[in-house]
Amino acid sequence: MLTDNEQQELREQSEYGHKAQAVHEFLADFLLNQRAQVINRLETDSFDKAEDLVNPIIYLRTLRLFELEVEKFISLGEIAERKLNEDGE
């Protein structure tokens, strides 16, 4: 049996996960578009120095890290919801 504090924390995590899921639905298209633009730039622009490639690569990695963070919150919300459902049975 979960304590009131544990239940409240799980409810908050679950709600945060639902919000993250809603954001992810919009974000998926945005991230795909951003990645396509960067890859197109990498394929078509001329880069005089290797250092010029650093910013686009960092941007791609930042997009991925951001996406992973959103996915983490979705997963944590799903886990919290399952725990709440198990406790309610």
Image (spheres, rainbow, N blue to C red):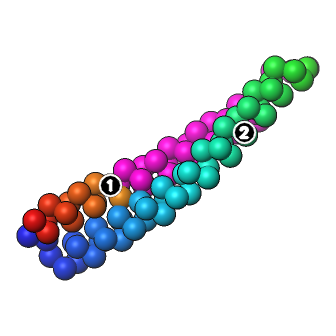
Instruction: Give the CA separation, mark 2 to mark 1.
Output: 27 Å
Query: In the image, what residue type sits under mark 2?
Result: Asn
Element type where label 1 sits in the image:
helix
Say which residue appears at 43% left-offset and 62% top-offset. 18
Placement of 70 over or under 55, stated as above or below: below
Choose between 89 and 42: the one closer to the eye.
89
Element type where label 2 sits in the image:
helix
Q: Which residue is mark 1?
A: 78
Disc marking residue 33: 2
The quadrant of the rendering that contains the C terminus is: bottom left
The quadrant of the rendering that contains the N terminus is: bottom left
Tell me the magenta residue range.
48-76
Packing grade of label 2 (10 A; few <14, some 14-19, many >=20) is few
Q: Position of residue 67 (x, y in %)?
A: 55, 45
The image quarter containing residue 83 is bottom left
Is 48 placed left or right of 67 in the picture?
right
Say which residue appears at 54% left-offset and 51% top-offset. 24
